[in-house]
Image: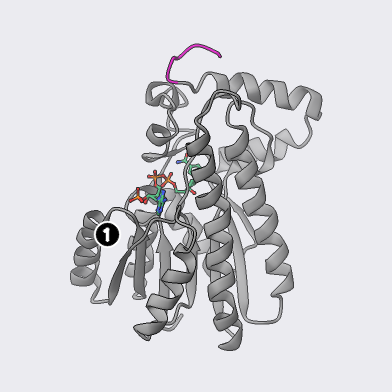
Amino acid sequence: MKKRTALITGASSGIGYELAKVIAKDGHDLVLVARTQKKLEELAKALQTTFKIKVTVLPKDLNLPNAAQEIYQELKSKGIGIDMLVNNAGLGTHGKFTQTDAAQDAQMMQVNIVALTELTKAFTPDMVAQKWGRIMNVASIASFMSSPNMAIYAATKAYVLSFSEAINEELRGTGVSVTALCPGVTQTNFFETAHVSQENINRFGSLVVQSAEEVAKSGYQALKAQKTVHITGLVNNLSVNSMQWVPRQIRTPMLGLMFSFFGENKEPS
Ligand SMILES: NC(=O)c1ccc[n+]([C@@H]2O[C@H](COP(=O)([O-])OP(=O)(O)OC[C@H]3O[C@@H](n4cnc5c(N)ncnc54)[C@H](OP(=O)(O)O)[C@@H]3O)[C@@H](O)[C@H]2O)c1
């Protein structure tokens, strides 16, 4: 692949941080987006020094209504075109729908769905015009299953999967491809934000829990291979595929029970 420019949202930690490292290692320039400017600047400095690439830091809160347009316009005014868009920023909430914080629910829908869609809308036409582009939207294995106790989160990820597959099909023959990356449980700050007990996550063990680095490497390979849907890891592939065979009436209560154990109170809710 010749030298390209990739925009990565949520590059300040977890999967996005590791994606920035693997894409930089391949020699591509980067635009890093998240709210925490200091972490982005530290990462930019390290990547510029190590890989001799250009890194632009763009601190932005994707929860704000015009964030996607502001990012597009700011880059345009700097003459920076985007060849690869990685919509990774996202958050979850754990708990029953009637009990979760409404403001955090709204933020989750704004970042996971609205900002992702608006960024894709802003950058795709230029990719089509140049006949080359790669988009990767970070979904989840939760995209495939209704998840009581993480109901809105799983629904936002079902949207990401559905949207990504559909527009990938629409873009066929344009030189632009869309990949939905579907990780399972990954060791990042995600669980702290979502009020999920880290102790309970650790109980899954290393066979289930992947590192952010592992997910990022596998995701980037899928982007390069223009894979439409990529589930990371053998166990996640087995879970998603076997779950399809379990009738919904059994599957949803089963998942509800499993997700109830995720809570910070460590007791099924
Ligand atoms: N960890 C898992 O088990 C898992 C599994 C499946 C899918 N995923 C998905 O993977 C993606 C990355 O999550 P992660 O696990 O790496 O979690 P993480 O470590 O918490 O990273 C989340 C990233 O999103 C950014 N972000 C959150 N809210 C934002 C906002 N309002 N504006 C701009 N950036 C924002 C954060 O940066 P700032 O706080 O600096 O803004 C951070 O860089 C998410 O879409 C998540 O749903 C995670």
Prevalent SS, magenta region: loop
Q: Nearer the viewer, residue 95 or 200?
A: 95
Q: Residue drawn at (71%, 76%), measured in percent from left and top?
A: 172
Residue 227 in view: yes
Q: Which residues are magenta?
A: 264-269
As displayed, is residue 149 above or below residue 117? above
In the picture, measured across the screen, residue 25 lies left or right of residue 122, that is left
As displayed, is residue 27 above or below residue 9? below
Task: Check mark 1 vs ligand 1: CB closer than 8 Å? yes or no.
Answer: yes
In the picture, measured across the screen, residue 257 lies left or right of residue 83, that is right
- From the top left corner, tell me how far across and down residue 196 is, in percent: 44, 27
- The quadrant in which the C terminus is found is top right
Which amino acid, by three-letter code, is at mark 1?
Answer: Leu
Residue at numbered disc 1: 40
As displayed, is residue 43 above or below residue 79? above
The answer to which quarter of the image holds residue 265 is top left
